[in-house]
Amino acid sequence: MTWPLIIIVAVIVILGIWLAASYNRLTKSRIRLDNSWSQINVQLKMRADLVPNLVNTVKGYATHEQDTLREVVAARSRFMSAETPEATMESGNEIANLMGRLFALAEQYPDLKANSSFLDLQSQLSEIEKKIAMSRQFYNDAVMLYNRQVRVFPGNIAAAIFGFRERPYFEIDQVEAQSPVVEF
């Protein structure tokens, strides 16, 4: 074998090892990302499962607020039929916003605020919201690491070769991000 042939073979072997290592690194990041998304999805599903119970509890007290209740049920339906992470994120944010409206509405009905079922559902929802926030943070961290590997040289070359694409962050809705107005 001649030196030029040895060098060419060595470069091909090194490139092959680098591509395999890059593919494995990207795959591990994508698996971590998919796992973190499934954790969010579980929490969002748990929140959506509370909606019918909450609507039924509120319905008995707030008979004049049927439009809000219908909106909440429709948002849950859109969530349950969402097929992409983006659609799930959007409908999940919509449910969060409507739940905020529903709880603000409950403030107008003292009997409802004192109802043990309502208080229990409110407590469960509060716990789920905390878990969603933690899961969202874990997911967004995983997205940041994955997207960095997809965008930064030389990993972007392997990502392009193997078809790895950037993933969206799970951002909270602007309405949800605003601090609530408290009046005394």
Image (cartoon, grey):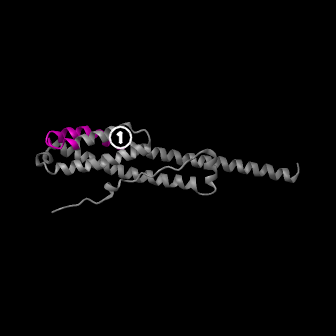
Task: Rate crowding at label 1 as few (under 14), some (14 to 19) or many (20 or more) other CA atoms within 10 Å.
Answer: many
Secondary structure mainly formed by the magenta segment: helix
Label 1 SS: helix
- Give the quadrant of residue 72: top left
Q: Is residue 98 found left or right of 36 in the rendered image?
A: left
Give the extent of the magenta segment: 43-67
State the residue position of label 1: 79
Please provide percent x and percent y for residue 77: 32, 37
- Of residues 172 and 68, the one nearer the viewer is 68
Q: Nearer the viewer, residue 129 or 86?
A: 86
Seen at 88% across and 48% down, the residue is 1
Type of amino acid at the residue the image marks with label 1: Phe
Vertical side of 38 occupied by 3: above or below: below
Q: Position of residue 161 (x, y in %)?
A: 64, 47
Q: In the displayed orientation, state which residue is furthest to the front.
A: 67
What residue do we see at 70% from left, 47% from top?
Answer: 16
